[in-house]
Every structure is written in structure tokens, then in C-alpha cells.
Amino acid sequence: MAPVFTASARRLGVVSAGRHVFLSVVYAITLVVGLVSLQSPQQPIGDPLFSILEILIILTMPVMVALMVAVHAWASPETKTFSLMALVFMGLLAGLTCSLHFVILTVSRQAAFAGLSWLPLFLSFKWPSIAYALDILAWDVFFPLSVLFAALVFSGSRLATSIRVLMIVSGVLALGGLSGVIVDIQWRNIGILGYVGVFPVAALLLAILFYRATPREA
């Protein structure tokens, strides 16, 4: 029997999935414009595009957590363990990346930090730096673990199977971003394809799946 969930969980799933798709499209467009404007691949994206990207990431994280809450509500009793693991890892991703990007967006701009020689080693996205390493931990470890566990929830219909496949592809690509630490940091772009390119498509299909689901009050 297909899983059913409450009307409030259904609304949460549809709205969070739709908003994630919207924010991802805006983020992808901003990122492409920023990358095209660079004179060198090693050059970081400058303001105001950099600040816009930071704000979009912070806005996206509560939406992604809400989406995983909906996935957990939708999951069958047999797959609740997997959906709970997905929710926990998404929460770790949200907490880490929101803290990191909020600090970079606010503290790193203060005049008291501007002249410090060690600042780029801690609060810049030029490799190697502490901030970059934490961002990799968030998006190339916690994110793929979340979506790979979430993928185990979906099976049966063609739509659910498509979501499962897209989540697996997204997770594998995100894990591939770890190669940037080992080989060359430019290889981290593999991971970006996973969470900026593939996962929003999975979120779009999730919105359709939740919209078609039959709500039932507990």
C-alpha cells in the first residue's frame, strides 16, 4: 500500500520542495554569472554576487530541513529508520553551513578583521582554509549521506523510483566532490553538480509526489 501522511505534512512537502527548486534556480543563475565574470578559475567570486550566494545558501537550509521532515513523514514504517538518518544528516548540514556562511557574511567584513594576515586561512573560500574545509564537510559528506539514506525510502511507482535514482546520483556526485581535497580543488565542482544540478530535479519530483499523495489525519 502506498504511504499516506497528514495534510499538514503534505503541504509542508509541496511548499518546501517548490521553494527549494526556486532558490536553487536563483542560486545556479547567480553562480554561473559569478563564474563567467571571473578572469581566472582561481579567482574568487566578488561582491555583490558573493553576498547574494551566501544569503541564498542560508535561506535554502531551513527549506531543505523541512523537505526532509516531509520525507520522514511520508516514509513507510519499514523505511522510517532511513528517513530519520536522512533528516539527522540534513540537520547537521544545515547547522554547519548556516553557521559558517553567516560568520563569513558578517564577521569577516568587519574592519577589525580586515588587516589580519591569518584571516584568509580561516574565513575565505580560497583553498586551503578552515572555512572551505568545513564547507566540504557539510556539502560533500553530510549532504550525500542525507540524500543516500533518503533514497532508500522511495520505491514502487515510476515517480518514486525516479526520485530514488536522482537522489543516488546526487549523493554520489556530492561524494565525488571530496576528490577536490585529494587531487585538485577544481574537482570539487563534481559535487556542485550533485547538489545544485541534480538534487533540485529530485525536489521537483518530490513536490509532484507529495501533491499526488492522499493526506490522512492521524
Image (spheres, rainbow, N blue to C red):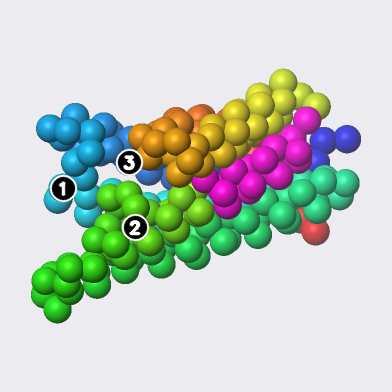
Q: What is the CA distance from the residue labelled 1 to the residue labelled 2?
A: 17 Å
Q: Write down the residue under mark 1.
A: 46
**Numbered badge on residue 27:** 3
Q: Earlier in the sequence, mark 1 or mark 3?
A: 3
Residue 192 picture quarter? top left
> For the residues carrying marks 3 and 2, which lies nearer the camera in this image?
2
Q: Earlier in the sequence, mark 3 or mark 2?
A: 3
Q: Earlier in the sequence, mark 1 or mark 2?
A: 1
Q: Is residue 207 visible?
A: no
Task: From the viewer's side, name the closer residue of 218 and 99.
Answer: 99
- Give the SS element for disc 3: helix
- Give the SS element for disc 1: loop
On screen, residue 188 versus residue 126, left or right, reads right
**Numbered badge on residue 129:** 2
On screen, residue 117 versus residue 102, left or right, reads left
Residue at point 22% right, 49% down? Answer: 50
Prevailing secondary structure of the magenta residues: helix
Q: Which residues are magenta?
A: 140-155
> For the residues carrying marks 1 and 3, which lies nearer the camera in this image?
1
- Using a 10 Å C-alpha cutoff, classify the residue at mark 3 as few (fewer than 14 neighbours), some (14 to 19) or many (20 or more): many
Residue at point 65% right, 59% down? Answer: 88
**Numbered badge on residue 201:** none
Queried whether the magenta region covers residue 147, the answer comes back as: yes
